[in-house]
Amino acid sequence: MKKILVLGVGAQGSTIVQRLDEEPSVQEIICADYDSEAVADITKITKKTRGVQIDCRSLDDIIDVATGVDLIVNALPLHFGKQVLEAAIAVGANYQDFSSPTNIIESCECDDCDVCDNYDEKLDSSWIDGIKLMYSDYSKQFEKIGKTAITATGSAPGLIHVIARRLMRELDSCDTIYLFVYEGVEAARFQPFWWSPYTALEDMSESGYAYENGKLIRTPAFGLPIKRSFSELGGEYEFIEHTHDEPVHMGINADKFFKGAKNIYFKYGGVGATFAKPLYRAGLLSRDEMEIDGVSVVPFDVILAHLPPAPKTKKEIQEIIDEGIIADVGCFVVEAHGKKDGKDVEVRIHVSAPSFLECFERASLTAEMYLTGQSGFIFTKMFIEDKYHQLGLISSDMLTDEQVDYYLEFAKKFDITYEIQYGK
C-alpha cells in the first residue's frame, strides 16, 4: 500500500488526487497547498485524503509533511522545484513534476560555458544549466537512495515526449522534429487563456527555445512562423515559436533517444497566441517599469490585471458554456523528418483527445485541465504499478519502448489515442 504526497492542489494537482483516490493500492494521499480553501475542496470529495496547509518556501516544512511517503507529486509553480526535489531526497521518496523547475540554479555566474555561448542573456542559461544539474548531480542523489525522479510529466511536456519517442520507431535516423500544439477553444465570454494567464503571458513574451544544427538556441517570441494544414483543424493555420521545455530535454537527449536529430522545434498556435501577439508588438508585455503621466507602471502587470483567471470549478466552466462556445478545435501533432530504409521519410503522429465540451461532460473539466491532468496521472500510475526501473532522475522523453507502450495503452482509458500518418 502506497502513501503519496501531492503538493499543489490546483487544476492539475486536484485531478491527480481524484485519480489516486480510485487506486486500490494507494493507502493515503496527503493534499498540501498554501491555499487552505483548495485543500478543503479536494478533501471533501475524496475518501483517502488528508489535507495540510503548507508554505512550500520552507524546505523543513516540506520535509515534515513528506516524511514516510513513497512518492511526492510536485504540482506547484516552477519556482518551488528545488525545495521539493531536495525534500524528496531527504525523506527517501520518489519524485514527479509537471515541468522542469526554474530555481535549481538562481543565476549563471560563469564567464564562459557551452550553454551561455548560445544565448544573449545569461539569466536564460541558468534554467538550462539547472536541467543539466538535475540530470547529473540530482540524478546521482536519487540513484544513491534507490529512488526514481521524473520531470516534465504533463501533456506538453509529457505526453508529447512519449509520442515523439513512439514516432522514432518509424525512422532509422532523424534529422528534424516539429512539435505542434494548437489550442483553439474560443468562448463568447472574454477568455483568452484556459490556464494561468500569468504563465501564458510569461511564456509568450519570452524568447523561445529550439535545438538547431545540434545546438540549443534562443528564438524570437512569436517568430519563425510555419504553416500546416491538419485535418483536425479544418484548414491551414500558423504556428509560431513559444517558450517550452521540449526542445531542451529532447536536444540534450537527441543522440540517445531521438535517432541523432539535429533540429527540434516547439510550435504553438491558437486563440491565446492571436490575442497576445499584438500586445507583444506594442510593448505591452514588457516587464520594464515606465512612467505615464507621472505614474510608474509595468505594462505586463497592467495587462495581467485586466485578464480573467482560468475557470476551475464546475460552476465557472458551466457558466462559460451557457454563454456560448464559438470554436472548439485543437491539434496535438509530432512531425519527424528522417530516413527509413535509405529513403527520405516524413511521418507524423496525430493525437486525438476529447474536445472541450466532451471533457466537461466527462469530468467537469476544461480540455486543458483534462488533457494535462490525465496525461500527468498516467506517469503517476506507472509509479503505483512499479513500471519505472530507472534509478536516478529522468525526463519523460527518456522512457523505454516498453514504458511508452504501457503509457499509450493506458491512455486509451481516457480516450487519448494516436494515429500514424506518412507523407505530407
Image: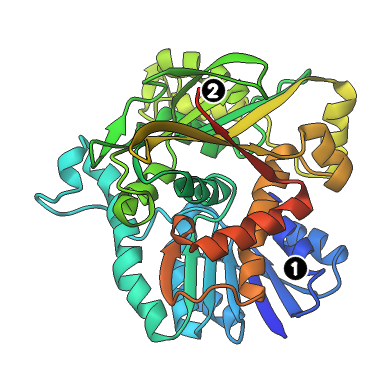
SS class, disc 2 = helix
User: What's under tag 2, amino acid-wise?
Assistant: Ala
Q: Is residue 58 visible?
A: no
On screen, residue 295 versus residue 317, left or right, reads left
Q: Nearer the viewer, residue 235 or 75?
A: 235
Residue at 73 percent across and 56 percent down: it is 15
Q: Nearer the viewer, residue 238 or 407?
A: 407
* Residue 189, image x, y percentages: 77, 20
Above or below — where is 299 with respect to 56? above
Q: Quadrant of the N terminus?
A: bottom right
* Residue farthest along the front direction in this orientation: 341
* Residue 171, image x, y percentages: 42, 44
Q: Is residue 110 visible?
A: yes
Above or below — where is 133 with respect to 216? below
Q: Are marks 2 and 1 in contact (CB under 8 Å)?
A: no
Residue at 75 percent across and 68 percent down: it is 20
Above or below — where is 59 with respect to 179? below
In the rendering, which numbered label is found on residue 93?
Answer: none
Residue at 55 percent across and 65 percent down: it is 402
What residue sits right under mark 1 in the picture? 20
User: What's under tag 1, amino acid-wise?
Assistant: Leu
* Residue 113, image x, y percentages: 13, 51
What residue sits right under mark 2 in the picture? 273
On screen, residue 308 versus residue 210, left or right, reads right
Above or below — where is 273 with respect to 350? above
Tell me which corner region of the image, top left, top right, bottom left or bottom right, holds residue 377: bottom right
* Residue 282, image x, y percentages: 42, 12
Q: How is the image coloured?
A: rainbow
